[in-house]
Image (tube, coloured by chain):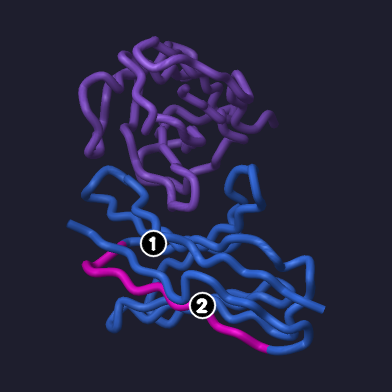
Chain colours: A blue, B purple
């Protein structure tokens, strides 16, 4: 059974500093996703990572994928208050019918 | 292009009742997946429908059932509601079972 673990579960950030969220998964996957969720809202897609060594960047967020280590990271550069949200990674396996398996989420709070 | 829509936005039901949630897939998408997100947790896969047939199911009891219609919209039905069914229910659509999923805004179900 595919398991996806994120850490930390909660991250209190200071504005202007850099932080990393880690996502480990237990079996070979076809794709890894990062989502953002604001309280009471749905999931906003941030990145889709398809292959080993993939790196994607959007603004202050950068995601990378190491399929050999089964590890993805979401790096936040110079955190700002607007980045406060919960971040989820999710993994899918085509052979399993594209069912997404999510991590437990990392709640991020950026303080001034 | 219309995105994924869900209805209703919120609803409150009593334990033992039945509920139907609805999802309209994004234009051109023929695959719909449903997820349950309990408070403070990551979404969990319930099931997926592809061309009106169930195409994969997560670890949910039979009282969770679904339908997909010829226009690819979908329903999630839950019978004999339990307090633990209180959650945000998310629908996601894609243009084929292996494609990237696009999430709707969700339906918040509260069971009292």
The image shows residue B19, relative to residue A10, as above or below, that is: above
Where in the figure is residue B7, as x and y percent of width and height?
59, 20
Residue count near mark 1 (Cα–Cα under 10 Å), binned few <14, some 14–19, many ≥20: many
| Secondary structure category for the residue under label 1 | strand
The one of B97 and B19 positioned closer to us in this rendering: B19
Where in the figure is residue A16, as x and y percent of width and height?
78, 87
**Which residue corresponds to mark 2?**
A21
The magenta stretch is A18-29
State which quadrant residue A80 falls in: bottom right
What quarter of the picture does the N terminus of chain B occupy? top right
Q: Is A27 included in the stretch rendered in magenta?
A: yes
| Secondary structure category for the residue under label 2 | strand
**Which residue corresponds to mark 1?**
A31
Counting the numbered discs, the total is 2
Q: Is A101 included in the stretch rendered in magenta?
A: no
Q: Are marks 1 and 2 on the same chain?
A: yes
Where in the figure is residue A9, as x and y percent of width and height?
47, 70
> Please, which chain is the residue tagged with disc 2 on?
A
> Please, which chain is the residue tagged with disc 1 on?
A
Indicate left or right for A41 with B65 as reference: right
User: Which numbered mark, 1 or 2, is in the foreground of this view?
Assistant: 2
The image shows residue A34, relative to residue B83, as above or below, that is: below
Asked whether residue B90 is in view, the answer is no
Q: State how far apart marks 1 and 2 are (Cα).
A: 18 Å
Residue drawn at the location 23% of the way across and 47% of the way down: A96
The one of A84 and A71 positioned closer to us in this rendering: A84
State which quadrant residue B105 falls in: top right
Residue count near mark 2 (Cα–Cα under 10 Å), binned few <14, some 14–19, many ≥20: many
């Amino acid at each position: 059974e595919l398991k996806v673990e994120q850490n930390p579960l909660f991250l209190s950030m200071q504005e202007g500093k850099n932080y990393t969220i880690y996502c480990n998964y237990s079996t070979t996957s076809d794709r890894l996703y990062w989502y953002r969720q604001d309280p009471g809202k749905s999931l906003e897609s941030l990145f889709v990572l398809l292959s080993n060594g993939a790196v994607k960047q959007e603004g202050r967020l950068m995601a990378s994928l190491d399929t050999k280590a089964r590890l993805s990271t979401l790096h936040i550069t110079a955190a700002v208050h607007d980045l406060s949200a919960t971040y989820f990674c999710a993994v899918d396996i085509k052979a399993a019918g594209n069912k997404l398996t999510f991590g437990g989420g990392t709640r991020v709070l950026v303080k001034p | 292009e219309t995105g994924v829509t869900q209805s209703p936005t919120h609803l409150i039901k009593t334990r033992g009742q039945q509920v139907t949630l609805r999802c309209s897939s994004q234009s051109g998408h023929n695959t719909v997946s449903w997820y349950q997100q309990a408070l403070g947790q990551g979404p969990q896969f319930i099931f997926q429908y592809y061309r009106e047939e169930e195409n994969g199911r997560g670890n949910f009891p039979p009282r969770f059932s679904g339908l997909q219609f010829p226009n690819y919209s979908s329903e999630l039905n839950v019978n004999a509601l339990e307090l633990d069914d209180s959650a945000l229910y998310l629908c996601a659509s894609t243009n084929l079972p292996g494609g990237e999923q696009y999430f709707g805004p969700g339906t918040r179900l509260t069971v009292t």
